[in-house]
Image (cartoon, rainbow, N blue to C red):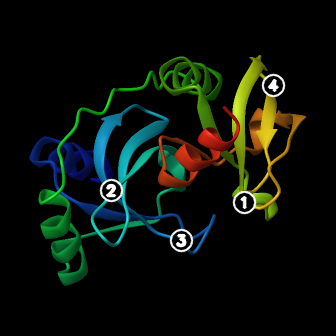
Amino acid sequence: MLLEKLKKFRKNQSLVEVSRREITSEDIICQIRTISDDFIQLTEYNYSGAYDGITIIYMDHISDILWESKSLESVEKLSRKLTHFEVPEVNLESMPQIITDLKEKFGAIEIWKETIGEGAQHGRVLDINDEWVHLEEFSPKHVVRSYKSLLRIGHITKVSTDTLYLKDLTKLYS
């Protein structure tokens, strides 16, 4: 049933709210962009209707989806007043392939390890294999320094790019 609904939302370009209750309490307001057996690519919007990047999550992490609500209708009305753009599709073959594709198309990415209580790590991918990502990590805006880190692929719950926050950070580190 989930796959049928997701395909319908994608075809109709419906705005939906995706929840991953076992991972986080934060919902994702989005349009469905690409679907694979294991992953789903979302085009995110904030509550003001502004485009807020591309996000890829695991299909198995989806706990519920909301659509046709008053709050989503408001976000959709606001988003339609903004400039339209083309969002590239990402290769959803595997997490290493997703990260490599985002690196090639956008440069900087956000890597989320939400199940172990961490937020996002922002930065540029320096190297990647099936188990690890080598990242030049950006500190928060108020610190403005970078450092190198290794992140285990198996701990990643979500990857994002082209977000408003990441664009600001990238400007600071360019």
Q: How far apart are marks 3 and 4 (CA)?
A: 27 Å
- For marks 1 and 4, give the one nearer the viewer: 1
Give the side of residue 136 with respect to residue 38, left or right.
Answer: right
* Of callouts 2 and 1, the N-terminal one: 2
Between 147 and 117, the residue placed more toward the observer is: 147
Q: Distance between the residues labelled 1 and 4?
A: 20 Å
Q: Position of residue 104 (x, y in %)?
A: 54, 17
Q: Do the residues labelled 4 and 2 touch (CB within 8 Å)?
A: no
Q: How far apart are marks 4 and 2 (CA)?
A: 29 Å
10 Å neighbourhood of mark 4: few (<14), some, or many (≥20)?
Answer: few
Q: Do the residues labelled 3 and 4 touch (CB within 8 Å)?
A: no
Badge 4 element: loop
Q: Position of residue 49 (x, y in %)?
A: 27, 65
Q: How far apart are marks 1 and 3 (CA)?
A: 12 Å
User: Disc 4 marks which residue?
Assistant: 131
User: Disc 2 marks which residue?
Assistant: 30
* Mark number, residue 119: 1
Give the side of residue 45 with respect to residue 74, left or right.
Answer: right
10 Å neighbourhood of mark 3: few (<14), some, or many (≥20)?
Answer: few
10 Å neighbourhood of mark 1: few (<14), some, or many (≥20)?
Answer: few
Badge 2 element: strand
Between 6 and 89, the residue placed more toward the observer is: 89
* Of callouts 4 and 2, the N-terminal one: 2
- For marks 4 and 2, give the one nearer the viewer: 2
Q: Specify whether residue 47 is in view.
A: yes
Which quadrant holds the C terminus?
A: top right
Q: Which amino acid does label 3 sit on?
A: Glu
Residue at left offset 73%, top offset 52%: 113
Residue at left offset 15%, top offset 74%: 73
* Of callouts 3 and 4, the N-terminal one: 3
* Mark number, residue 26: 3
Residue at left offset 12%, top offset 60%: 81
